Image (cartoon, grey):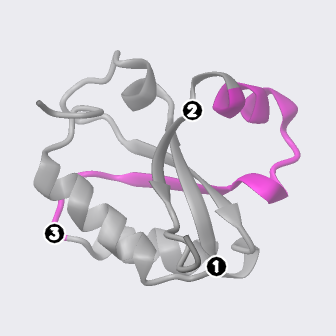
Amino acid sequence: MEEFGLSEKTINLIRNFFKLYPQVEEVKIYGSRAKGNYKRGSDIDFAVFGDCEDIIGKLSAGLDELPTPYKFDVTDYNSLTHQPLKDHIDRVGKLFYKKENKNE
């Protein structure tokens, strides 16, 4: 079964990419892919949590370099000032990636 309209291979590729950045604590997918009303060419909206303000550009560029046909919109949740977008992420966002805690 395809979660968020993405193949398991694509999901694993993206999650492994986020693992390269220890600053990324968790990532929520939001927008049409989280709501389930995406279309084939819908972009992938990610809200990134953690100390990520300085690496958002790097994350966005790196995701665009992955061998996928998708466009990515990456937002640093902690830097968001647009409250309606924060509310949307809080309401419809679904956990996509969570950093593994080595102590658990």
Dot 1 amino acid type: Gln
Dot 1 falls on a residue whose secondary structure is loop
Q: Which mark is residue 93?
A: 2
Residue at position x 58%, y 24% from top? 92
Disc 3 residue crowd, few under 14, some 14–19, many 20+, Cα 10 Å: few
Q: Earlier in the sequence, mark 3 or mark 1?
A: 1
Q: Is residue 8 left or right of residue 24?
A: left
Dot 3 amino acid type: Pro
Q: Is residue 87 magenta?
A: yes
The answer to whether one can see residue 77 in this image is: yes
Tell me if residue 1 comes above or below residue 62 in the rendering.
above
**Residue, far front:** 104
Q: Nearer the viewer, mark 3 or mark 1?
A: 1
Residue at position x 65%, y 33% from top? 89
Tell me if residue 62 comes above or below residue 71 in the rendering.
below
Residue at position x 59%, y 71% from top? 24
Q: Is residue 31 magenta?
A: no
Q: Nearer the viewer, mark 2 or mark 3?
A: 2
User: To which residue does mark 1 refer?
Assistant: 23
Dot 3 falls on a residue whose secondary structure is loop
Look at the image and tell me in which quarter the N terminus lies.
Answer: top left
Dot 2 falls on a residue whose secondary structure is loop
Stretch of the chain drawn in magenta: 67-90
Q: Is residue 71 left or right of residue 103?
A: left
Q: Is residue 94 left or right of residue 9?
A: right
In whole angstroms, how far apart are the C-alphas of marks 2 and 3?
24 Å
Tell me if residue 53 comes above or below residue 95 in the rendering.
below
